[in-house]
Amino acid sequence: MSITAVHPMREDAVKEFLDRAKADWSIVHELVAHGQLIRKEYDGSIFYMRKIH
């Protein structure tokens, strides 16, 4: 979450981060479902960023 507060992360970068942390996409899906993380498409790529309140 702290990384995405500074700048959006591309989907492939999120995947690499999760792989290194030995985590899966369920974390991302949960954060999106709870409104803590936003999934956006821009210029043909998917980005994730922290929702600013």
Image: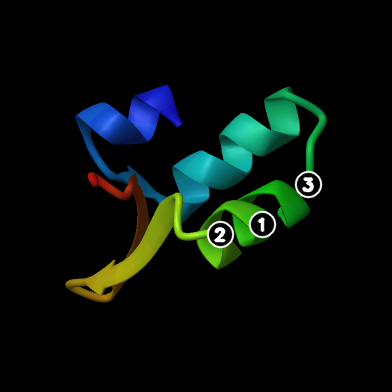
Residue type pointed to by label 3 = Asp
Q: Left or right: where does residue 26 sit relative to residue 47?
A: right
The residue to which callout 2 is attached is 34
Residues at marks 1 and 2 touching, judged by CB atoms closer than 8 Å: yes
Q: Which label number is shown at residue 22?
A: none
Q: Give the alpha-carbon distance from disc 1 to disc 3, as whole Å.
A: 11 Å
Name the one closer to the observer, 44 or 25: 25
Residue 37 in the figure: left or right of residue 40: right
Of the residues under marks 2 and 3, which one precedes in the sequence? 3
Q: Position of residue 52 (x, y in %)?
A: 23, 45
Q: Earlier in the sequence, mark 1 or mark 3?
A: 3
Looking at the rendered structure, the kind of residue marked 2 is: His
Answer with the quarter of the image where residue 39 lies: bottom left
Q: Which residue is mark 3?
A: 24
Kind of residue indicated by mark 1: Glu
Q: What is the x, y in percent for residue 22? A: 82, 29
Colour approach in the figure: rainbow
